[in-house]
């Protein structure tokens, strides 16, 4: 079994910064892509950023230049550094990871439980 646990959310003023973390644990053989998604009230979940196993990154246009995704494979952890936050960034942020396990062999995506980010003065 694999678990993803996010942390680092909270309340921040417009223009402020937050750093989200997501740690994966369990019977992990390898983690391929890792990413972040968010869901604002009354809206569908949307993709924010992805980082592949070789470190390549991609970002949604709405966060490009403000957010940075990174990963620490020794800790099975993905991060999202969020700068210049705007009220429209308010959402529940979820991490996602494509995980390979052995015994039994599985290759599937896992989700964290979400962490609330609120940008407000």
Image: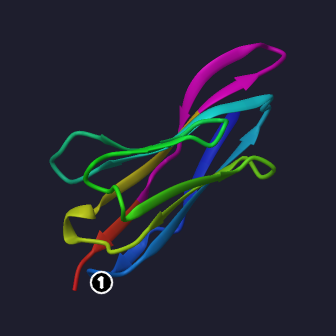
Q: Which secondary structure dominates the residues rendered in magenta?
A: strand
Q: Is 98 placed left or right of 61 in the picture?
A: right
Residue 53, percent from left and from top? 66, 35
Q: Residue at x 45, y 52 (%)?
A: 114
> Range of the magenta residues?
98-115
Q: Position of residue 14 (x, y in %)?
A: 26, 80
Color scheme of the displayed model: rainbow
Name the secondary structure under disc 1: loop
Q: Sort mark 1 into few (<14), some (14-19) or many (20+) by Cα contacts within 10 Å.
A: some
> Considering only vertical position in the picture, is 35 above or below 101?
below
When asked about the image quadrant of residue 46, the answer is top left
Closer-to-camera residue (20/114)? 20
Quarter containing the C terminus: bottom left
**In this view of the protein, which residue sits in the foreground, 64 or 93?**
64
> Left of 62 or right of it: where is 92?
right
Question: At 56% across and 32% down in the image, what residue appears?
Answer: 110
Q: What residue is shown at x 34% (from left), y 49% (from top)?
A: 38
Instruction: Answer left or right for 13 relative to 41.
Output: right
Counting from the top left corner in percent of width and height, residue 34 is at: 56, 39
Magenta span contains residue 11: no
Residue at (36% x, 81% y) in the render: 16
Residue at the outermost left position: 42
Q: Position of residue 33 (x, y in %)?
A: 58, 34
- The residue sitting at the right extreme is 103
Q: Is residue 109 magenta?
A: yes
**Residue, disc 1:** 13
């Amino acid at each position: 079994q694999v678990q993803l646990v996010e942390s680092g959310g909270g309340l921040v003023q417009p223009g402020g910064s937050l750093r989200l973390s997501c740690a994966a644990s369990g019977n992990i053989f390898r983690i391929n892509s890792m990413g972040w998604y968010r869901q604002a009230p009354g809206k569908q979940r949307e993709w924010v950023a992805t980082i592949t196993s070789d470190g390549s990154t991609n970002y949604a246009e709405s966060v490009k230049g403000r957010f940075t995704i990174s990963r620490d494979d020794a800790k099975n952890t993905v991060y999202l550094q969020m700068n210049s936050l705007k009220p429209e960034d308010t959402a529940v942020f979820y991490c996602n990871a494509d995980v390979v396990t052995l015994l039994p062999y599985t290759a599937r995506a896992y989700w964290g439980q979400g962490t609330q980010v609120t940008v407000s003065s």
